[in-house]
Image (spheres, rainbow, N blue to C red):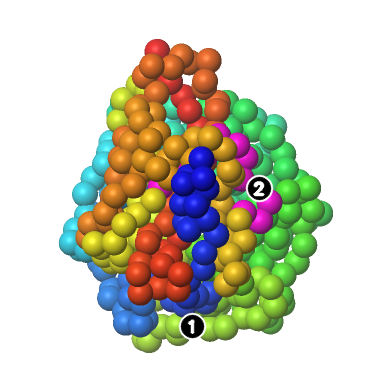
């Protein structure tokens, strides 16, 4: 036990100088192209060097973007044909390194009961969620990548037809967060099954727009339709206006790494078009990128920081998953990593490090086993060496029963780097896997 505690102290109670708040990781920005023609996207590297991406066959509603479980691709929903009958819709992914698009699924909207598609979220199984916001009531739609099937979950009286503002998997507790951008605006939480949606809190008026994200303390940050940069919704359901910037409309916000000290959100501004960073501690708003003529992708709705899904899971069988740890861009390749899993809730504030970073994991026997690579057969390969695309391992719960369904397993990972302070380099975001053992 003393050896285990010593390893824990090394891995989970040290500090480093990496992951500085407000440092641009590079972005993928999508817009709404509501007429016949090509979709345009803007990709920025960490130095804000722009690349315009044009796709002739995948267009429309490009404000729905998320990142694949391996942290290598951008996932989107969109229209695959012009707005005419019959309408073809689809789910697509863009390989950032290769610069190529692939179709995950496409077909007539009538085959999936779709009228319109908006927003995308990838859950702990790697399944893709989107929303049909042009029907009454609105419907959450899940595409099961393991089985290749669709499921539909009407929101009923909880929502109007005004649209969903953001759709995101909750990394801390599981389930989907999504906000109503009509009047009044409201924040909802849908559980991992899709069948149960609850109201977190309603605002007094329409204060939410198209995008939203969750921060490390469970607060939802919503982009706005008005002059405020954002509205926040705490876990008690209270809406609070953020900084005001006259003439600015923030259409999408996305959190930066939870492990970055200070932390803030990245913003895709509609008017004037730019990328901005909001320090959520001071409220300071800094414009980090202003596009040149013709660079901004139509109506810029969605901003996704590259390499923002450094820890995730995806289903590989009825009771098996794969975990993926990829800091991105080959960061840490050749160094040792440690993946931790825990069955207890993430403590408020996580485990605080001396440089103000936090590791979001709860201490329990499973975590101790992971740190010494002894959690098999349940969680395998928890200690090893990172390759250029990170590392992965199996989660095998096939010896357990479906009585475990609904149990949250919390994951986090660190990279050991001899050149970093106290030997600790990258710290991943937390990730919550909700167990669903299939019959």
Q: Helix, strand, or loop for circle 2?
A: loop
Q: Position of residue 161 (x, y in %)?
A: 61, 43
Q: Which label number is shown at residue 299?
A: none
- Whether residues under marks 1 and 2 lie with C-beta atoms below 8 angstroms apart, the answer is no
Q: Badge 1: how crowded within 10 Å, few (<14), some, or many (20+)?
A: some
* 307 magenta-colored: no
Q: Is residue 397 something that shows in the picture?
A: yes
What residue is drawn where x is 27% and y is 56%?
386
Q: State the residue position of label 1.
A: 288
Earlier in the chain: of badge 1 and badge 2, it is 1
Q: Is the magenta stretch mostly helix, strand or loop?
A: loop
Q: In this view, does 8 lie above or below 99?
A: above
35 or 23, nearer to the observer: 23
What residue is drawn where x is 53% and y is 15%?
403
Q: State the residue position of label 2.
A: 347
What residue is drawn where x is 40% and y is 73%?
420
Q: In which quarter of the image is residue 355?
A: bottom right
Q: Which range of residues does the magenta coloring cover? A: 339-350
In the image, farthest residue toward the front: 2
């Amino acid at each position: 036990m003393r050896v285990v505690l010593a390893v824990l102290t090394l891995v989970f109670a040290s500090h480093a100088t990496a992951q500085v708040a407000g440092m641009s990781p590079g972005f993928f920005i999508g817009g709404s192209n509501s007429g016949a023609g090509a979709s345009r996207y803007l990709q920025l590297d960490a130095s804000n060097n722009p690349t315009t991406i044009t796709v002739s066959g995948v267009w429309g509603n490009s404000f729905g973007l998320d990142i694949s479980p391996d942290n290598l691709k951008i996932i989107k929903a969109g229209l695959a044909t012009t707005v005419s009958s019959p309408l073809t819709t689809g789910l697509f992914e863009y390989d950032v390194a290769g610069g190529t698009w692939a179709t995950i699924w496409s077909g007539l909207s009538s085959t999936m009961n779709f009228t319109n598609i908006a927003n995308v979220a990838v859950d702990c199984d790697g399944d893709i969620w989107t929303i049909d916001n042009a029907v009454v009531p609105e419907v959450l739609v899940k595409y099961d990548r393991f089985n290749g099937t669709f499921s539909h979950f009407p929101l009923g009286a909880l929502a109007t037809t005004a649209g969903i503002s953001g759709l995101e998997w909750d990394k801390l507790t599981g389930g989907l967060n999504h906000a109503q951008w009509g009047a009044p605006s409201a924040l909802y939480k849908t559980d991992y099954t899709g069948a149960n949606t609850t109201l977190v809190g309603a605002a007094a008026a329409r204060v939410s727009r198209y995008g939203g994200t969750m921060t490390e303390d469970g607060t939802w940050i919503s982009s706005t339709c008005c002059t405020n940069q954002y509205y926040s919704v705490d876990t008690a359901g209270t809406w609070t206006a953020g900084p005001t910037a006259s003439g600015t409309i923030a259409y999408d916000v996305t959190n930066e790494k939870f492990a970055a000290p200070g932390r803030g959100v990245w913003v895709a501004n509609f008017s004037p078009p730019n990328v901005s960073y909001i320090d959520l501690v001071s409220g300071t708003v800094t414009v980090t990128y202003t596009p040149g003529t013709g660079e901004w992708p139509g109506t810029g709705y969605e901003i996704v920081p590259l390499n923002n899904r450094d820890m995730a899971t995806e289903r590989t069988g009825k009771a098996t998953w794969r975990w993926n740890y990829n800091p991105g861009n080959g960061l840490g390749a050749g160094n040792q990593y440690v993946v931790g899993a825990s069955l207890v809730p993430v403590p408020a504030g996580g485990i605080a490090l001396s440089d103000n970073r936090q590791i979001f994991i709860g201490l329990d026997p499973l975590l101790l086993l992971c740190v010494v690579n002894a959690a098999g057969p349940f969680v395998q390969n928890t200690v090893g060496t990172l390759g250029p695309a990170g590392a992965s391992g199996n989660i095998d719960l096939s010896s357990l029963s479906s009585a475990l369904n609904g149990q949250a397993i919390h994951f986090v990972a660190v990279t050991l780097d001899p050149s970093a302070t106290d030997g600790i380099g990258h710290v991943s975001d937390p990730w919550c896997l909700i167990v669903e053992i299939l019959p």
